[in-house]
Amino acid sequence: TQARRQPGSAFKPIVYLTAMENGLKPGSKFVDSPTSIEGWSPQNYDGKFHGAMPLKQALARSINTIAVKVSEHVGREKVIKTARRLGITAPLSTSPSLALGTFGISLIELTGAYAVLANGGKGIWPFGIIEIYDSYGSRLYRRHGGGAGQIVEPHYVRLANDMMREVVQSGTGKKAKLDRMTYGKTGTSQSFRDAWFIGYTEGIVAGVWVGNDNEAPMNKVTGGGMP
């Protein structure tokens, strides 16, 4: 609930949701190729470039260069506004590496952002305590209030879900595939310091983070593995 760690590619669904809301489609094609922005050149996990592909495949395969190109295409400020709308309050980098999740965020905030997509686009405010009673059984507190209403139009939720399902069907999240409709995204930060998987089915949203408290690198643990 408090520790902020780099989400890596687990932030990419927010980039692609922003893209869908600004005219792109899951089938829109971008080219995975060397690129340099403000002197920074993103690399893919495998160190290779794979040419043109639809955004749906780029997310499933977690292609870094295309995520960055999409972020630059729609504008970083719009990506940040989408993150804020989904409930993310953590400080966000305005650098080109924003698309690759190079800032710190808490697990509960990022899981809450995914929960908006699982909830049909209706806002989610994560909470932990429903009621408090004293030793005599008298209720001292009960949580009231709901979410933030409809914050993502259902059409864009469907497009985002279509892309997130492909991640689990054929992409980096295959190990999370279940015998029902499953959606999600993996994330791995620099030097294997953080490994994430956040996913959902019709009835539940779950976020998993694996890492060392002192931020020491792990032994090549990725979001598509242990989480």
Image (spheres, rainbow, N blue to C red):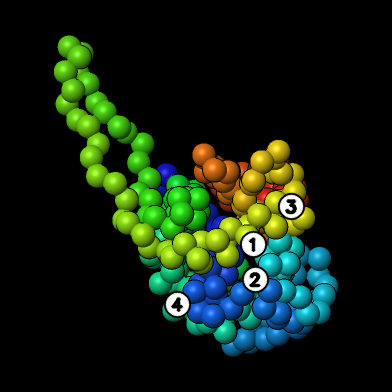
Mark 3 and mark 4 in contact? Answer it, CB < 8 Å.
Answer: no
First of labels 3, 4 by sequence position: 4
What amino acid type is highlighted by mark number 2?
Answer: Pro
Mark number, residue 169: 3
Count of labels shown? 4
Q: Is residue 82 above or below residue 33?
A: above
Q: Is residue 29 above or below residue 210?
A: below
Instruction: Indicate which label's residue lies in the foreground, 4 or 2.
Output: 2
User: Can residue 172 be seen in the rendering of this structure?
Assistant: no
- The residue nearer to you, when weighing 200 against 10, is 200
Residue designated by label 4: 78
Disc 3 crowd rating (10 Å Cα; few below 14, some 14-19, many 20+) is: many
Identify which residue, 148 or 40, lies in the foreground.
148
C-alpha separation, residue under disc 3 versus residue under disc 2 = 15 Å
Q: Which mark is residue 26?
A: 2
Is disc 3 placed on a helix, strand or loop? Answer: helix
Does the residue at mark 1 contact the one at mark 4 (Cβ under 8 Å)?
no
Mark 1 or 4 closer to N-term?
4
Q: Are marks 2 and 1 in contact (CB under 8 Å)?
A: yes
- Residue at x-position 66% and y-position 54%: 165
Label whose residue precedes the other's in the sequence (3 or 2): 2
